[in-house]
Amino acid sequence: CVECAIGPSMLASDLSNLSSNAKSVIAAGADELHLDVMDGHFVPNITWGAPVIKCLRKSVGEDAYFDCHMMVSSPSQWVKDIADAGGSRYCFHLEAALTDSNINSSVVELCKLIRSCGMEVGVALKPGTDVSAVRDFVSLVDMVLVMTVEPGFGGQKFMPNMMPKVVHLRDTFPNLNIQVDGGLSPSTIDVAAKAGANSIVAGSAVFKAADKEEVILGLRNTVER
Ligand code: DX5
Ligand code: ZN
């Protein structure tokens, strides 16, 4: 049975206080920090990159797990920078990796590069990408992220029609870490957990809550049930 992880998406926090917000969710029971890196090209929004992650790492310390969700057009380009900044997992989008011209470009090479830099490997699928596209790469990664909104913005509505992808992956790979990201909250966690997701990203649901600890615990209890 794969372990449950709850990762608050820092994008939903007050970004002028990134560090104190990170510490507050760790204190509230978060297993990892979900850091959404957007380049304004792969997605129509810009957030932050390695320099910000580096400062955050310095401020929260070595123990925190930094789950870097790379919504960038050229995933091979940022591997070293993110590793140097203190990234723990580098989760690239399969759609970007398949067209990345900066690497002689196989997904296999990208996975090797990420590992050689000391990070775990994640691969993400946009809602429109069929789950069959990732099948050949599952053995190379530590986690598959099934997006449950169009990447780019927090606070969107959960897409329950992505659950067949999660079910398929869980049936095929019983020990795989399967992450869901987008619109996860106490009211949508049931279906995601039932489908077989064990790694849960939640932005608005955590940061808009009066009691973050209660929300994180609620999500965890549902997944572990
Ligand atoms: C969307 C990001 C998500 C987002 C989640 O592109 O990948 O991580 O911040 O936020 P919520 O939980 O508010 O949908
Ligand atoms: Zn994300």
Image (spheres, rainbow, N blue to C red):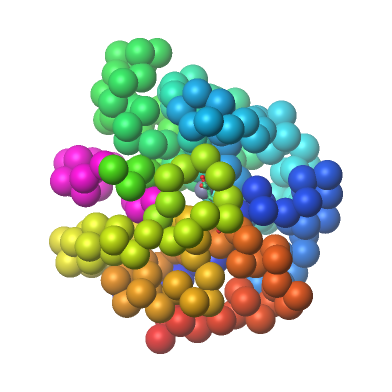
- Residue 133 falls inside the magenta stretch: yes
Q: Decide which of 5, 187 is in the foreground and name it.
A: 187
Name the side, left or right, on which 39 lies relative to 76: right
Q: Residue furthest bottom?
A: 225
Image quarter (top left, top right, bottom left or bottom right) of the N terminus: bottom left
The answer to whether 179 is drawn above or below residue 1 in the figure is above
Name the side, left or right, on which 139 lies relative to 179: left
Image quarter (top left, top right, bottom left or bottom right) of the C terminus: bottom left
Residue 15's spot in the image, x, y percent? 77, 45
- Which residues lie in the magenta part? 129-147
Which residue is painted at 35% across and 13% down in the image? Answer: 101
Q: Decide which of 93, 23 is in the foreground and name it.
A: 93
Q: Residue furthest front?
A: 157
Which residue is painted at 58% across and 55% down in the image? Answer: 155
Q: Decide which of 63, 5 is in the foreground and name it.
A: 5
Residue 52 figure quarter: top right
Name the side, left or right, on which 135 lies relative to 98: left
Residue 207's spot in the image, x, y percent? 70, 63
Residue 6's spot in the image, x, y percent? 54, 66
The answer to whether 132 is drawn above or below residue 220 in the figure is above
The answer to whether 75 is drawn above or below residue 141 in the figure is above
Residue 148 figure quarter: bottom left
Which residue is painted at 62% across and 76% down in the image? Answer: 215
Q: Is residue 110 visible?
A: no
Say how many tags the image has. Answer: 0
Q: Is residue 149 visible?
A: yes
Residue 69's spot in the image, x, y percent? 51, 42
- Residue 3 falls inside the magenta stretch: no
Which residue is painted at 50% across and 36% down in the image? Answer: 70
